[in-house]
């Protein structure tokens, strides 16, 4: 018999295990999840590679942090879709009828999506290396950068839980969350300098958490990058602390909201 | 005998009071017996089960399972109930085995105990051969059996089955009935919802008929049949003869006849059996009405249902804002 205090954790891990089992049954999910970012790396590297004149090490140094952040941002959509599917099929009802902690299901699910991100980031990192990406900072900085990426994905995953439990139809939820995250990743400094954008977009990009994360990761990989309307704004000059502020905010808002939503989730 | 399931004056509205799913529903189930909730789509059957299984909080009213309040102590309730049906589901990408082990673990069995129980249940429900196949590849009947197995992992004393055979073919339905009858023999208290009168007749000790979130009748299947009276005359006539035939029928039987317009079928309860039938035929002959079909019928639960909800369904058509029509 497990001790009472550990139950929410073991329950969450059982849910995470379920997600990993799903991947072994439907490996296409993992393959597609990995192929898509790898494809982005290759496309951007060779289509926009010429833009990198003057960047030490070429465009790929700028590109890789951008694509890493974009990929983990899509976690929001992945989590949302997974939750919406479970909801639609009545699985959420089943879990809610079990004597498990209310938070355990959502924690397990976000953890699973986080683990998936590790695999994806490793494959992307290797691909990046093969096409010329060479971070110039030390191992500690690089590892810290990857941890930040995982944490950012995890924080967004909680927003995904909330979105997934809102919708009635899994496909609609998937489409909406994609329509939300895709522009979010492009209206940033991820792939191009923000200074050539129209002014309103520059403001948006300046306060877009994606920009801040990209700048933080670039800095951690040894490449300083200013963005936004003014290079002296707080997000632009302090991207690492600002990223953490965004992540903590996201989780502070969406963790309680999502758990509450799950508690009252009702298919009908 | 004590009450295993108790619901008193449950009220639940959706969409800011626009839709009243439960409107003062009251029922109770004695320990070790089977109660069937019978009603059309949208009558409040599923909502009742969801409230009792702690998935939904009622706006008002009181409900308890094995003496435990479902609102005040939902976690305790979840430890002793099993839920299966049209909504509670299993993971389709996983195998039957994976599902049962996972749910077993979530009921806080040890890993070893969860595996032993999964093996037992797969055996009991004739799914051993399909154990290592994803649920996606199961037939409808197999899927329902696995779903039910998942609800039985901790041998619950109280079981909720929400439309357990809806969508199954006749063979799957008979299999499912056999499984459910086996459980009942083992002494489980069962609350079962169904749209099929035959199913309630077959499985339940007691039946409550619900419509629009209220219990409109309760009794054993025999008692409910008694309520409609003895035999009925049923006949089918040509379109043009409907009103004439109805008038004669109502006069002879001294009760109101029910018309199924689509089938052009009239039916009315009678007390004096064959004598009334003779009278009706004689009068038809005099008026030149030739029924396409005419018969004496012993009452079925269908008749009970019709006599209890027939007019209600008609009213519902006039108020489409109530969403979900009455009978399908």
Image (cartoon, rainbow, N blue to C red):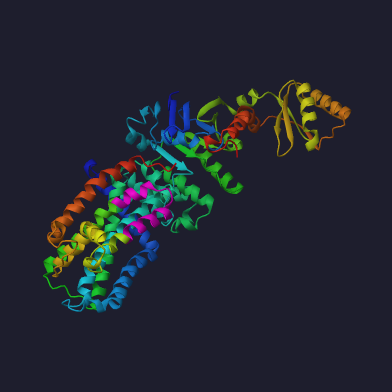
Q: Position of residue B14 (x, y in %)?
A: 43, 35
Main SS, magenta region, reads: helix
Up the image or down, A71 lies above or below B2; here it is below
| Residue B166 percent coordinates (x, y) | 55, 44
**Residue name at image x 33 percent, y 34 percent:** B76
Q: Is residue B27 visible?
A: no
Q: Quadrant of the C terminus of chain B?
A: top right
Q: Nearer the viewer, residue A199 or B281?
A: A199
Between residue B180 and residue B86, name the one nearer to us. B86
The N terminus of chain B appears in which quarter of the rendering?
Answer: top left
Q: Is residue B285 left or right of residue A220?
A: right
Residue A129 in the image: above or below residue A219? below
Question: Residue B195: percent from the left, percent from the top?
Answer: 57, 38
Residue B112 appears left or right of B307: left
Q: Residue furthest front?
A: A199
Give left or right: position of B140 versus B57.
Answer: right
Asked if residue A137 can be seen in this view, the reply is: yes
Was residue A174 drawn as part of the magenta stretch in this picture?
A: yes
A37 displayed left or right of A216:
right
Residues drawn in magenta: A159-182
> Where is residue B136 shown, x and y percent of the image?
47, 57
Dividing the picture into quarters, in which one does residue A81 lie?
Answer: bottom left
Whether B61 is among the magenta residues is no
- Counting the numbered discs, the total is 0
Residue at 39%, 66% (x, y): give it: A28
């Amino acid at each position: 018999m497990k001790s009472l205090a550990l139950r929410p954790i073991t329950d969450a891990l059982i849910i995470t295990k379920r997600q990993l089992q799903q991947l072994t049954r439907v490996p296409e999910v993992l393959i597609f999840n990995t192929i898509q970012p790898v494809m982005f790396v290759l496309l951007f590297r060779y289509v926009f590679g010429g833009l990198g004149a003057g960047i030490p090490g070429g465009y790929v140094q700028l590109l890789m942090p951008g694509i890493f952040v974009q990929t983990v941002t899509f976690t929001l959509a992945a989590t949302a879709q997974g939750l919406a599917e479970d909801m639609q099929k009545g699985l959420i009802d089943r879990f809610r009828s079990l004597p498990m902690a209310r938070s355990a299901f959502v924690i397990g699910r976000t953890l699973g999506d986080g683990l998936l991100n590790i695999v994806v980031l490793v494959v992307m990192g290797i691909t990046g290396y093969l096409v010329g990406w060479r971070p110039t900072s030390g191992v500690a900085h690089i590892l810290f950068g990857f941890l930040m990426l995982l944490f950012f994905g995890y924080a967004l995953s909680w927003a995904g839980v909330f979105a997934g439990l809102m919708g009635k139809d899994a496909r609609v939820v998937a489409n909406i969350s994609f329509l939300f995250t895709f522009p979010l990743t492009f209206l940033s400094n991820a792939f191009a300098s923000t200074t050539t954008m129209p002014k309103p977009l520059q403001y948006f990009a300046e306060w877009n958490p994606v920009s801040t994360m990209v700048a933080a990761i670039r800095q951690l990989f040894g490449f300083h990058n200013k963005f936004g309307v003014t290079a002296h704004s707080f997000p632009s000059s302090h991207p690492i602390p600002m990223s953490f502020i965004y992540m903590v905010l996201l989780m502070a808002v969406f963790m309680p909201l999502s758990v509450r939503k799950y508690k009252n989730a009702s298919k009908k | 005998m004590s009450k295993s399931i108790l619901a008193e004056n449950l009220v639940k509205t959706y969409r800011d009071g626009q839709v009243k799913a439960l409107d003062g529903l009251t029922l109770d189930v004695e320990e070790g017996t089977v109660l069937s909730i019978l009603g059309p789509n949208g009558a409040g059957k599923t909502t009742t089960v969801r409230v009792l299984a702690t998935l939904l909080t009622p706006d008002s009213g009181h409900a308890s399972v094995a003496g435990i309040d479902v609102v005040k102590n939902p976690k305790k309730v979840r430890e002793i109930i099993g839920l299966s049906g049209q909504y509670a589901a299993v993971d389709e990408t996983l195998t039957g085995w994976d599902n049962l082990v996972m749910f077993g673990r979530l009921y806080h069995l040890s890993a070893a105990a969860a595996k032993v129980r999964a093996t037992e249940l797969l055996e009991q429900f004739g799914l051993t051969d399909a154990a290592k196949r994803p649920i996606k590849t199961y037939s409808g009947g197999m899927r329902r059996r696995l779903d039910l197995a998942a609800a039985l992992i901790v041998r619950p004393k109280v079981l909720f089955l929400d439309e357990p055979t809806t969508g199954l073919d006749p063979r799957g339905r008979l299999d499912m009935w056999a499984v459910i009858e086996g459980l009942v023999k083992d002494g489980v208290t069962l609350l079962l919802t169904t749209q099929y009168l035959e199913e309630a007749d077959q499985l339940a000790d007691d039946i409550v008929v619900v419509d629009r979130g209220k219990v409109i009748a309760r009794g054993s299947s025999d008692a409910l049949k008694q309520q409609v009276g003895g035999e009925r005359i049923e006949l089918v006539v040509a379109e043009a003869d409907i009103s004439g035939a109805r008038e004669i029928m109502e006069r002879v039987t001294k009760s109101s006849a029910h018309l199924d317009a689509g089938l052009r079928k009239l039916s009315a309860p009678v007390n004096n059996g064959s004598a009334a039938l003779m009278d009706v035929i004689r009068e038809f002959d005099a008026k030149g009405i030739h029924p396409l079909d005419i018969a004496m019928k012993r009452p079925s639960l269908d008749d009970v249902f019709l006599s209890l909800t027939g007019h209600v369904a008609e009213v519902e058509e006039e108020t489409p804002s109530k969403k979900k029509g009455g009978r399908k």
